[in-house]
Image (tube, helix red, strand yellow):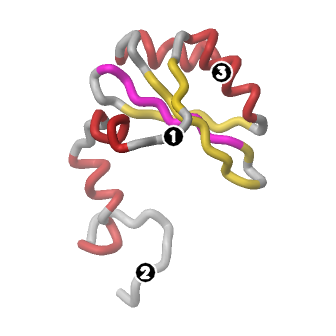
Amino acid sequence: MTRRLRGFVARHGAETEGQISYLGERGYRLVLVGRDGAFGDQVAPGREILVRAAERAGITLRESFDGELAARVRTGPYEWSRMAGLQIGGPSNGGPSNGR
């Protein structure tokens, strides 16, 4: 896991930041935002696993995914089509069909 996080930092900048959220039964999710606005994530069964891996990879952890961090995220056409897929006829994300 640390190797994957270090790879993200190497590709997207040493100022990579992240935030850990509880997912419930699945565990915890670390959302990453690179200096260049790229984003990614990593899921683990325990929070401490993600904290240790992030520390080893040089990722600064934030308490919340606030507006400042969200504003750094850069999305492309793929992400926009996935986010709006069901509403505007883009690719399905496996959710309900909204009656279509």
- Residue at point 49%, 67% (across, down): 94
Q: Which residue is mark 3?
A: 1
Q: What type is the residue that disc 1 sits on?
A: Ser
Which segment is the magenta one? 28-35
Query: Answer yes or no: do the residues labelled 3 and 1 have beta carbons within 8 Å?
Result: no
Question: Seen in the image, is 47 located left or right of residue 58?
Answer: right
- In which quadrant of the rendered view does residue 51 lie? top right
Neighbours of disc 1 within 10 Å: few (<14), some (14-19), many (20+): few
Q: Secondary structure at mark 3?
A: loop
* Distance from the alpha carbon under mark 2 to that under mark 3: 35 Å
Q: Which residue is mark 2?
A: 97
- Foreground label between 1 and 2: 1
Q: In the rendered image of this protein, does residue 14 appear above or below residue 75? A: above
Q: What type is the residue that disc 2 sits on?
A: Ser
Neighbours of disc 3 within 10 Å: few (<14), some (14-19), many (20+): some
**32 in magenta:** yes
The disc, 3 or 1, on the residue closer to the chain's N-terminal end is: 3
Q: Which residue is mark 1?
A: 64
- Residue at point 43%, 81% (across, down): 97
